[in-house]
Image (tube, grey):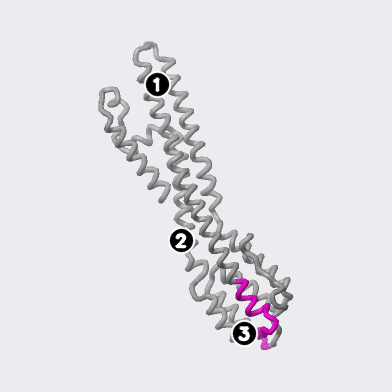
Amino acid sequence: MIANGTMFGLTGVMLAAGQSDAGGAAGAIQVQSVWDFLVKGGPMIIPIAACSLAALTVIVERSVVLRRVRVMPSGFVEGVRAAMSGGISSALEYCQANASPIAEIFRAGLRRHHDSPERREKAIEEAGAREVFTLRKHLRLLAVVAAIAPILGLLGTIFGMIKAFQTVAISGDALGKTELLAKGIYEALITTAAGLLLAIPALIAYHWLSSRIDRMVFDMDRVTVDFFEETLFAPSSVVRSSDGAVSSGGNGRDASVSLASR
């Protein structure tokens, strides 16, 4: 959406500017639509358009998946605390019923409530790493598109320049060679413009989504540490397991959870 909208919007401005140039010589290379403008870019417009569709798909998909209501549902922590009154099994059932990245991290810690703080911490960190990997899914594709789009545009321009100079070279009459060369260069530069018009919004979208993920990972880290230190890691905490047995929560603040570094 961002990539295609920016690309075709700026292309339309360039098209309008080109059509406003009056003169007989300019009339030979004027185009009548954005589609005609892109077609004149040659075969390299096809992979650039494919990259544009890939970038659009990733941006839309990640924008939906990375909504805070899906990553950290409002009131989730309070719900887990309330469910803890019925025991660990009730809290695990609540996490399973409210599936989300933060719920999976909590489940990993709650399933290890009877273990040592070190093993519980490791389980939480491993679950956090898996969820962070899921949040970053497909972002590398967006980074690749931002990197290769200008290169594809430059390659298309080089091919166009070769064709333009070849046309001039095989022209038998010296008269009109300047016009032929100008037309060829004009068409060759279209792919460079198209590649840049795709790469710039794709790069912006990549950093925007990455910063959004970083903020959510930081928030999940903070919430997870606070919850388990207050509930399971506190020296005075008492946890009722699914079989009704009572066990202490752990060794206070000796254990820490870190998701932000993942």
Amino acid type assigned to the residue bearing label 3 in the image: Gly
Percent position (x, y) of residue 70? 49, 67
Percent position (x, y) of residue 247? 71, 85
Amino acid type assigned to the residue bearing label 2 in the image: Val
Residue 134 colored in magenta in the image: no
Percent position (x, y) of residue 69? 47, 68
What is the count of numbered marks?
Answer: 3
Chain-order first, disc 1 or disc 3 = 3
Q: Residue furthest top?
A: 173
The residue carrying mark 2 is 64
Using the numbered discs, state the Cα–Cα distance from disc 1 to disc 3 in whole angstroms: 80 Å
Q: Nearer the viewer, residue 149 or 118?
A: 118
The residue carrying mark 1 is 181
Asked if the residue under mark 2 is in contact with the one under mark 3, i.e. CB atoms within 8 Å, the reply is: no
User: Does 166 appear above or below 44?
Assistant: above
- Packing grade of label 2 (10 A; few <14, some 14-19, many >=20) is few
- Packing grade of label 1 (10 A; few <14, some 14-19, many >=20) is some
The residue carrying mark 3 is 87
Quadrant of the image occupied by residue 144: top right
Task: Say what secondary structure mark 2 lies in.
Answer: helix
Q: Give the range drawn in magenta.
A: 224-244
Amino acid type assigned to the residue bearing label 1 in the image: Leu
Q: Is residue 76 left or right of residue 110?
A: left
User: Does 246 appear above or below 122?
Assistant: below
Using the numbered discs, state the Cα–Cα distance from disc 3 to disc 2 in whole angstroms: 34 Å
Task: Say what secondary structure mark 1 lies in.
Answer: helix
User: Does 10 appear above or below 60?
Assistant: above
Task: Say what secondary structure mark 3 lies in.
Answer: loop
